[in-house]
Amino acid sequence: MNKFIRILGIVLLGVSAVFGIIFYAGPETAGGAPTFTNTILLWAGILAGIAAVLALIFPLIEMVMHPKKARGSLIGILVLVLLGLIGYALASTEPLTFTKPDPNNVPSILKLSGMGIITMYILVGLGILSIIFTEIGKAFK
């Protein structure tokens, strides 16, 4: 498995280097922009997709191989899902008042945006509380 990852990394690095050379050494459009800009952006999207898939697959493989260690990770994931559900329940669907009409001013988008903001507030608050309690705990030791 490690050999596969190493070979995959070398191949992706090589292709990225070739695209980088083509980008900087390649021709330019009439406006002066590099011709291969869309190719580089497409390659960046492919690399991001590969990274996302690998970021999901490898932890799953690790959980299957070491199920006892997976319990802590699953509890963390469940807590994050619970916090997201709390944020969703607290989010409002009331339309905002704008001077110009906004196509994103619909209840479904407002609910998800509100969920993200409220969940972020909860996580920031929990982070600050954990810092405070950690420092207080150190003071008493």
Image (cartoon, grey):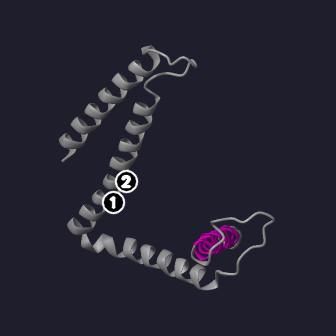
Residue numbers of the magenta segment: 109-132
Residue type at the position of mark 1: Leu
Circle 1/circle 2 CB separation < 8 Å: yes
Residue wearing tag 1: 56
Mark 2 element type: helix
On whether residue 114 falls in the magenta region, the answer is: yes
Q: Magenta region's main secondary structure?
A: helix
Left or right relative to 141: residue 70: left
Residue type at the position of mark 2: Ala
Locate the C terminus by quadrant: bottom right
Q: Nearer the viewer, residue 74 or 84?
A: 84
Residue wearing tag 2: 52
Question: In the image, what residue occupies the spot 47% across and 77% down?
Answer: 81
Mark 1 element type: helix
Left or right relative to 57: residue 25: right
Q: Nearer the viewer, residue 94 or 133?
A: 94
Figure check: 111 above or below 64? below
On whether residue 67 falls in the magenta region, the answer is: no
Figure check: 44 above or below 141? above
Left or right relative to 106: residue 136: right
Q: Nearer the viewer, residue 64 or 49?
A: 49
Within the image, what quadrant is residue 132 found in?
Answer: bottom right
Within the image, what quadrant is residue 89 found in?
Answer: bottom right
Spatial CA span between label 1 and label 2 = 6 Å
Toward the front, the furthest residue is 101
Within the image, what quadrant is residue 21 found in?
Answer: top left
Q: Residues within 10 Å of mark 2 (few under 14, many from 20)?
A: few
Residue 127, given in percent of the width and then of the height, sits at: 64, 68
